[in-house]
Amino acid sequence: TAELAQAAAQAAADLLTPPTPVRLGDVVPAPELVAPDATADFTLGADAVIRVDADPAARDVAEQLAELLRPATGYPLPVTDTAPDDLLTLTLSAAAQPESGSWKETAPGGAEICQDLAPAGASAGGAEVLGDEGYRLDVTASHIRITAVTAAGLFHGVQTLRQLLPAAVESATPVAERWVVPGGTIIDRPRFAYRGAMLDVARHFFPVEDVLRVIDHLARYKLNHLHLHLTDDQGWRIAVDAWPKLTEVGGTTEVGGGPGGWYTKDDYLRIVRYAARRHITLVPEIDLPGHTNAALVAYPELAPGKIAPPPYTDTEVGFSYVDPADERTYDFIADVLGEVAALTPGPWLHVGGDEAFKVPADAYRAFIERAQQLVAATGKTVIGWHQLAPAGHADGRVLQWWGTNGDDPVTAEAVRRGARLILSPAKHAYLDMKYGPDTPIGHDWAGLIDVRTAYDWDPAAHVAEVPAEAVLGVEAPLWTESVTSLAEIEFMLFPRLPAVAELGWSPRATHDWEGFRERLAEHGPRWATAGIAYHRSPEVPWP
Ligand code: TNX
């Protein structure tokens, strides 16, 4: 009967007029090299098999591809490492680097067939390697093949393939559709190593399921880091065994007086593992020395004067801090960072450092230098907001720049001393800013951020006197003082998250607002089908 159902599905699909296939270049973020071949469209049939190498990480990507395609197609799509080549197969292979020179071979006469790349961009395709995250996608009438050096590269290739199928592929239930994929070749790899988004789970708490869905959204757009802002004045969201009241007391509040909440270690590990399967690294932030009211409510011994402050559920910033003059504070930090580091496979620990307005500059610098050492002692590399800049350099340290004025000599000096930057300029990348004056939620202290503003800036040339080599990447933060539900998170993320993702992934030669808004428009129906509540910005020609 499974066979019958399959045959029926196939027969129904055959009757349909072919949808206008997605164009090969209609991918967000824009790929480095696109070489369409209009004679080579592929149609996914009910008998398709996904063939993959025996490598377990590659196999898992193939399983995820099958999981993406099965609900809407209704096809069985078995994953195997034994199917012969001449079947209609999707082949994932982690083995191959493209042979040297193949960037040019795949695009003979580049200008004619590379629709979406200036010829200069195509030949500047430069290095003949796919690297840690690149992939090659070949679509012919008889097969689709994704090739990459790493499972992460395969995974990104799968996200591209997903966008090349009709929008109905996002449906959770079977749809009668001709599953046409446009023919040709894409060769692609990221511009920046670090491409992230931040979710503030402290101002409002969001359950694990919501975070997992946000991870799915990051994965679609080839982002590879999720920064969780786990602690703030309004709530402490991660269990620490040595200091249990952080969550038992400090976790029970949030902005507006709601019940708050926190992640147990198992919850956190669920998030870590879900992200890891999608080749996304978790970056936990413990904000210090300011933004700590919730911790002080739980443990008054950490407060200056040892007096418990009242719980805080409003939205002012900059009033709280742990006592930098008390040694107990550093025991606390060592315990917290140690436990969080032990739960976190990724290389980073974020220590905040923003808006500690009440701590004098000298005390602040000394505090940060000790905090940086405590991070190093866990084996992790420190990230902090760019307020860390005046403190001494620590090996590998990364500053997350959220300024509103690119003239920032203090940050530039920290970069000269060895720091690298993650770019989160508040006027462009802050997803908690309103789109326009009528946006029902969000802030406007850094300005209004419509889609074009989120898209039109260059991470490599944004902060004066900071060379492109010092830029590790980009991150779009979502603060949640005014964001209370998953639907509101999605409304603020879409469509600006894909804009920032494209800045992080795509070569600068592809940067083009007109082209971007047209490619983006085709994603509206995908989001609608996936149940994503997005902002229908008037700047984008939605179909
Ligand atoms: C500033 S930007 C903050 C956050 C607020 C945000 C609101 C930064 C590092 N700190 O505490 O949530 O503004 O937009």
Image (cartoon, rainbow, N blue to C red):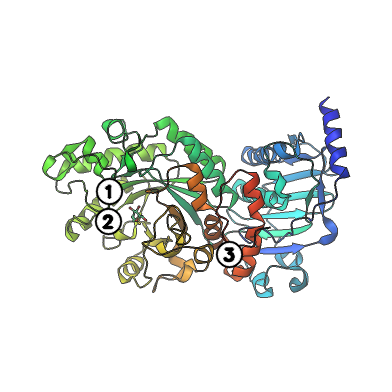
Residue that mark 3 sits on: 539
Using a 10 Å C-alpha cutoff, classify the residue at mark 2 as few (fewer than 14 neighbours), some (14 to 19) or many (20 or more). Answer: some
The amino acid type found where label 3 is placed reads Glu
Separation of residues labelled 1 and 2 (CA atoms) = 8 Å
Q: Which circle's residue, 3 or 1, is located before the other in the chain?
A: 1
Please state the horizontal and vertical placement of residue 315, each as a whole percent of the image.
30, 49
Separation of residues labelled 3 and 1 (CA atoms) = 36 Å
Front residue of this view, candidates 32 and 479: 479
Instruction: For the residues labelled 2 and 3, say whether their Cβ atoms are less than 8 Å apart.
Output: no
Separation of residues labelled 2 and 3 (CA atoms) = 34 Å
Quarter of the image for the N terminus: give it: top right
Determine whether the beta carbon of the residue marked 2 sits less than 8 angstroms from the nearest atom of ligand 1: yes
User: Which type of secondary structure does the marked residue at label 1 adopt?
Assistant: loop
Please state the horizontal and vertical placement of residue 90, each as a whole percent of the image.
76, 44
Residue that mark 2 sits on: 355
* Position of residue 264 in the picture relative to residue 459 (left or right): left
Quarter of the image for the C terminus: give it: bottom right
Instruction: For the residues labelled 1 and 2, say whether their Cβ atoms are less than 8 Å apart.
Output: yes
Q: Which circle's residue, 2 or 3, is located before the other in the chain?
A: 2
Q: Residue at horizontal 27%, vertical 56%?
A: 355
The amino acid type found where label 2 is placed reads Glu
Front residue of this view, candidates 217 and 86: 217
Q: Residue at horizontal 70%, vertical 50%?
A: 161
* Position of residue 362 in the picture relative to residue 182 (left or right): left
Q: Residue at horizontal 51%, vertical 57%?
A: 193
Res 291 label? 1
The amino acid type found where label 1 is placed reads His
Using a 10 Å C-alpha cutoff, classify the residue at mark 1 as few (fewer than 14 neighbours), some (14 to 19) or many (20 or more). Answer: many
- Mark 2 or 3: the one toward you: 3
- Above or below: residue 63 compared with residue 349: above
Please state the horizontal and vertical placement of residue 487, each as a whole percent of the image.
51, 44
